[in-house]
Image (cartoon, rainbow, N blue to C red):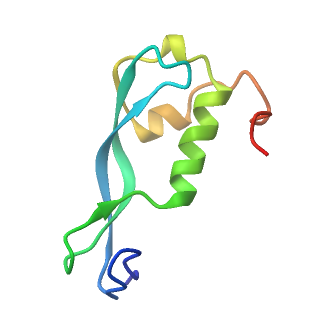
Amino acid sequence: MLICNWCQHEGAVEAQKTAFWELPDGTRAVEITNVPSIQCPNCEMTYIDDDIIDEIEDQFMLIDTEKLPNSFTYQQFMNQPKLLKKNYFKF
């Protein structure tokens, strides 16, 4: 069992949810399905862990976002060919 970051309840569980993200260049937003998330039955909050958010943000900086469709799964997104070895904009 996981501990909810919002209410500290020890009954949070892993889930897969849909998230919407704006591309780094601001040209459009995309839908990412099956994103690893955490869901709390106590406070009813569903959220994405900071580590997953960092992975998503980094991936957007490493791939050709123009080739992305408007909707895709998290796994499809993470499997996109990388143009850079790392996110050079991250400190």
Whole-percent x, y for residue 58 in the image: 64, 39
Q: Is residue 68 above or below residue 59?
A: above
Relative placement, left or right, of 21 versus 16 is right
Relative placement, left or right, of 39 versus 74 is left
Whole-percent x, y for residue 31 in the image: 33, 31
Q: Nearer the viewer, residue 22 or 10?
A: 22
- Determine the residue positioned at 72% across, 21% down: 83
Whole-percent x, y for residue 28 in the image: 40, 17
Find residue 60 and report its image quarter. top right
- Determine the residue positioned at 31% across, 86% down: 9
Looking at the rendered image, the quarter that the N terminus falls into is bottom left
Q: Is residue 83 above or below residue 66?
A: below
Q: Nearer the viewer, residue 47 or 35?
A: 47
- Determine the residue positioned at 21% across, 76% down: 43
Q: Is residue 42 above or below residue 82?
A: below
Find residue 12 and report its image quarter. bottom left
Relative placement, left or right, of 77 versus 59 is left
Whole-percent x, y for residue 18 in the image: 29, 43
